[in-house]
Amino acid sequence: MSNIPSNLRYTKDHEWARLESDGTVVVGITDHAANTLGDITFVDVRVGPGAQVTAGALFGTVDSVKAVSDLFAPIDGEVVAVNGELEASPEEVNTDCYGDGWMLQIRPTDAAAFERLLTAAQYEALIKDYE
């Protein structure tokens, strides 16, 4: 059974989003996605600080021993930070996907977009048939 924190929001593409007190949104992949991929060997975030991302648009890939998986932005906004630690330690996504395994931090174009993402209960319902 996947770990699905209730304080986060989710996408159908298995990304999570956490609203920070400064209004930015931290993004990563879910425990379900990390477990499905297996051992993650490389994280390729193809955008950097200052870049604009669009909800549903590709921002990078995750390579694992099983597959390469695309990463999609959950909301529109400006990238304010990228987790450079993942270049040397991609396994952080497997060991702490909701903490040290984060990938991007975005300043949303529309603050309400976060609330339109899936709740933990909605995401749990989405993945229940896969577990």
Image (cartoon, rainbow, N blue to C red):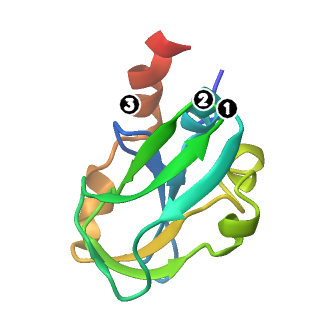
Q: Nearer the viewer, residue 24 or 104?
A: 104
Residue 89, given in percent of the width and then of the height, sits at: 76, 61
Amino acid marked by disc 3: Gln
Q: Which residue is mark 1?
A: 38
Q: As rendered, which of 73 and 60 lies closer to the eye?
A: 60
Which residue bears the numbered disc 2? 66
Q: Helix, strand, or loop for circle 3? A: helix
Q: Residues within 10 Å of mark 1 (few under 14, many from 20)?
A: some
Disc number lying in front (3 or 2) = 2
Q: First in sequence, mark 2 or 1: give its number.
A: 1
Q: Are marks 2 and 1 in contact (CB under 8 Å)?
A: yes
Amino acid at dot 1: Gly
Q: Dividing the image into 4 quarters, which one contains the C terminus? A: top right
Disc 3: which residue? 122
- Locate residue 123, reporting x and y percent: 42, 32
Residue lying at 67% horizontally and 67% vertically, measured from the top left: 87
For residue 48, which numbered disc appears in the image?
Answer: none
Amino acid, disc 2: Lys
- Marks 1 and 3 sit apart, C-alpha to C-alpha, by 24 Å
Dot 3: few (<14), some (14–19), or many (≥20) neighbours within 10 Å?
some
Q: Nearer the viewer, mark 2 or mark 1?
A: 2
The correct choice, above or below, for 80 with respect to 73 in the image is: below
Is the C-beta separation of discs 1 and 3 under 8 Å?
Answer: no
Residue drawn where x is 75% and y is 51% of the image = 91
Q: Quadrant of the N terminus?
A: top right
- Label 1's element? loop
Q: Is residue 75 left or right of residue 90?
A: left
